[in-house]
Amino acid sequence: MHSAYGYPAQTNRASRAVRGGETGNARTHTSETTSWTVVEDAWNPQRANYFETMFTIGNGRLGTRGSLEERHTGALPGTFIAGVYDAYDSPVIDLVNAPDWLDSEVFVDGLRLDTESAQVVEHHRALDLRSGVLHRDTVFRLPSGARARLRTERFASSADRDLCCLRIEVTCLDYAGAVTVRTGIDANRRNLERLPTYHEQTAFGYERKWDKWAKSTHLVSVGAGFDGEVGVIESRTIDSGVDLAYAFTCSADSGQRHQRVRHDGIEVQWHFDVGADETVRVDKLVGIATSRDYRAVRPPRARALDTVARADSFDTAAAANRAAWEGMWAAADCEVVGDDRVTQALRFAIYHLLIAADPDDPTVSIGAKALSGEGYRGHVFWDTEVMLLPFFLFTRPRAARALLGYRHHTLPGAREVAADNGTGGARYPWESADTGREECPQYTPDGKDRFYTREEELHITADIAYAIMRYAAVTGDDDYLFGEGSEILFDTARFWVQRCVEDGDRLAIRTVMGPDEFHSHVDNNAFTNRLVHWHLQQAAAVYERMSRERPQRVYELMASIGLEAGEPALWLATADRLRAPTDPDCGVIEQFDGYFDRTVVPIVDWDDNGMPRLPVGYSPFDCETTSLLKQPDVVMLLHMLPDEYSPATRRLNYEFYEQRTMHKSSLSPSIHAIVGLQVGDCRTAERYFERSAFVDLDDNQGNTEEGIHIASAAGTWQVATHGFGGLRADADGLRFAPALPASWQRLRYAVHWRGRSVRADLGHRDARFELVGAGPSVEITVWGQPVTLEPGVVVEVGAP
């Protein structure tokens, strides 16, 4: 999927394939009610980091990992605010691990209630996917034998993205006791930085592994105190100069209140005398604001104070949050009738997608781990446009538009990247953050291995053009296409014209890396060249349309970016000369020049999930001379441009490359599932779907603790809707050709289409559709048959 820049799991522990339901993993369920929840049923410190990722709460603006409020040895907590980056003492920029708004402790008769100071008798946590609320219920036994119960609820409001809420309840179950609840904001946070090189088999226990990393400092405290009973703490990122302000209120029905301030933290302590079986409650409301917030005018401190003032109460905020989630699920839910475990996996994936995007901020995007962890430093890759955008296109078009807005916001940085590499136009970086400049490191975190993605993985520029055209086709938003979209299309087309080199009577693109990152320094990567060919043609077509339909916009754009009238013709001429696999019956497409000459190393070993293991003696950094692939490359081309190749060509290439692919990226299984279904390989597609759907629930790559595999979550949704659900959409309309697995009874989902929603209820031999929203009728195609949908009328269609 990316440069190998996640935390290298093999240095911390041996990677382990685990199946759903094993001790320490999220429990999977078999009922309608519990398909909306993910559950932890016992305390297991060795799996605590896994649940920290799984139980991430968020709202698109920020995400907070599911750490215990009081922490534990080996905890990896984190709150990440979209767009807040810094590189003060790190080699490349980090998504900042922001001040911790959960910071809390509970004492009963002077004993701290935590998993090491007291005995855990019962422990249960449940993430309610329907409302984005994380519930906790832990019973501790004190040395005296008495028991105390700690219950909490937390959420990041989707009704007010500046607001986070925490409720703490403590019950002395068998006795009367003294209870202290301390809660506040801890601004003394660090990012993980660099892991030393250890012997390959070295493994550290859960209590040590994160301690072995170096740490980066990105925040300095610039003020802390109380305004009456409202606590306020302000920080600033050291290099990027982003101001952060947290304000919080803390309320209880009784008890004695005390306030404390230190330079990098503020807190409130409540002291209670609690009777037997009596419960005390503390509610905490937190407002968060930064100086980079989109279109914000007033200072962060004032806005943070406003947030907690308008929140009113925990219960009021919780009700507003539930209502916001109801609206999101109405548009995004995907249900498999007859398989509740798959439904849970789909809803879990959708939940994490919904908390990853902010439809109100076009200056931020979604990183490789979304807002659930520090993996890949929070950098943005091609995943957003190729894997994630389709979900938002069909469920939350405003969010899709905002994600594309990020690429326009960072277009100046892309122009700098092109200039730095000796060309004009705009070249998007392989890894980007807040500015659009290249942020990809040259070496793995332990310094052992060099990778060349920053220099060579150029296809991201064409991938962004692809996303622009997909958005325009699905939404019909010509204002966007002829506005920000065309500026990106044209400036990136200019880059490709200059990047191509003469190769006899043809043009070539040399020294690149395709999606398959096992092979660097290659010439004429088929995926890259074909997407560039397509990109140049699309840019010229948009220019021609604009000249007819929006000539004034063309004049404005020519003036603003110096576009000359002859350039679109040059784009077409470049496309015509570029070596690219365009013949619809071209047989097996050579992935790059000389690929067919690479050593064939057969895959002979598979793990418990049915995924291939690297042959003995090989690692991801020494497969250059082999035919082994990290992830789909030619197969990805077939996925993105399915109509450009004949069914025979697609099947031939799928069968050839599928047996050479190692699936060392979490996006790989879902793409193979979709293309496999298109070429008739249903059995293999179902296996790949399982791998994608349960990558985090089952932790089947052994690294969920580092953050959610957000590209896999989006791929899982695509397999269900576009694969098994048979959805295709373009400027000509919606097409459905469902082909469900035998174990599924029905598949239900909705797609947003031109301002309205089409609800699909798909079976093996029948399908039902409903058009929601006022307006004219809509023509769709089902199993090749034209079908007319009228608003509010359910139409049933039988398979031919």
Image (tube, helix red, strand yellow):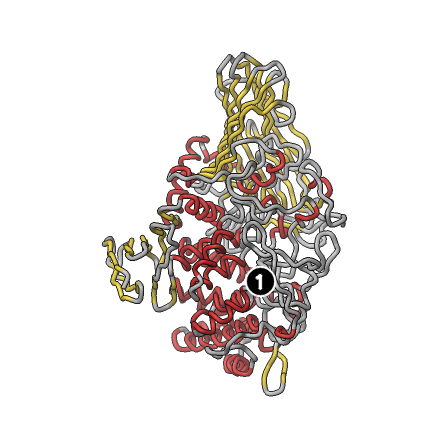
Find numbered disc 1 in the image and state the secondary structure of the residue it sits on.
loop
Left or right: residue 546 versus residue 290 is left
Can residue 484 be seen in this snapshot?
no
- Residue 341 location in percent, x, y? 43, 44
Q: Nearer the viewer, residue 500 or 485?
A: 500
Q: Is residue 665 above or below residue 245?
A: below
Amino acid type at circle 1 is Thr
- Residue 658 location in percent, x, y? 54, 64
Quarter of the image for residue 130 reads top left
Q: Quadrant of the N terminus?
A: bottom right
Quarter of the image for residue 2 reads bottom right
Q: Nearer the viewer, residue 341 or 770?
A: 341
Disc tally is 1
Q: Is residue 341 above or below residue 126?
A: below
Q: Is residue 304 above or below residue 543?
A: above
Instruction: Identify which residue is drawn at 49% across, 57% down.
Output: 670
Instruction: Identify which residue is drawn at 63% across, 63% down.
Output: 517
Q: Which residue is mark 1?
A: 661
Callout 1: few (<14), some (14-19), or many (20+) C-alpha neighbours within 10 Å?
A: many
Q: Nearer the viewer, residue 418 or 696?
A: 696
Q: Is residue 335 above or below residue 24?
A: below
Q: Quadrant of the C terminus?
A: bottom left
Quarter of the image for residue 548 reads bottom left
Q: Residue furthest front?
A: 604
Q: Nearer the viewer, residue 233 or 740?
A: 740
- Residue 789 location in percent, x, y? 25, 59
- Residue 754 location in percent, x, y? 35, 60
